[in-house]
Image (tube, rainbow, N blue to C red):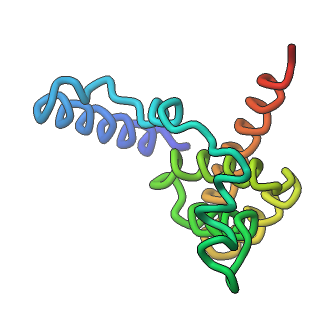
Amino acid sequence: MTDAFQKLFSQMLQSGQEMARVFNPALEKFDARAFEKLIPTMPADMLELWFGKTFNRDGLDARTRFLVTIAALTVQGALAEPQLRLSIRHAREAGATPREIAEVIYQMGMFGGLPAMQKALSLAQDVFAEEQEDDQP
């Protein structure tokens, strides 16, 4: 990043924080990632019920639906960060492998651009690391 861009980015961030403080002081410290803690991953059976073949008999299974969702959210980039993390967790619960998730994200680099792809891969790695931490005794 150039110094001019860094300065502009910093000014934009400060302006956004000031707007949030003026509109609602409680939003000044708001972190959208905290929503992830409120919405736990559904069990595989529940995912299949709601997103898989139960309500969509001739459609896609839950795993495939979540892979498609990850593709779409990757293209949206930073606008969909919390939703992408949640969808990655749900895809894992529905049976998608880390490799399959990474391949979907790589493919979207052609459509959403490299920065969106890199951000999505970073988020996916974070989710995979959290899974490993949860699995350790």
Vertical relation: 113 (above or below) 133: below
Residue with the most extreme top position: 137
Residue found at x 73% / y 71%: 61
Residue 7 location, quadrant: top left
Q: Residue furthest left?
A: 22
Q: Residue at x 75, y 48 (%)?
A: 93
Viewer-proximal residue among 64 and 29: 64
Position of residue 53 measured from the top left corner of the image (x, y, whole percent): 69, 73
Please state which of residues 40 and 88 is positioned toward the viewer in this rendering.
Answer: 40
- Asked which quadrant contains residue 99, the reply is bottom right
Q: Does residue 53 appear to the left or right of 4 in the view shown?
A: right
Residue 40 image position (x, y, % from top left): 58, 37
Q: Is the C terminus in the top left, top right, bottom left or bottom right quadrant?
A: top right
Residue drawn at (78%, 32%) of the image:
131
Percent coordinates x, y for residue 13 in the rendering: 33, 36
Q: How many marks?
A: 0
Picture residue at 71% right of the left edge, 77% below the top: 60
Which of the 4 image quadrants contains residue 75? bottom right
* Front residue of 118 and 104: 104
Q: Is the residue 45 above or below the residue 50 in the image?
A: above
Pick the quarter of the image with the N terminus: top right
- Residue 104, how many percent across, how many down? 76, 66
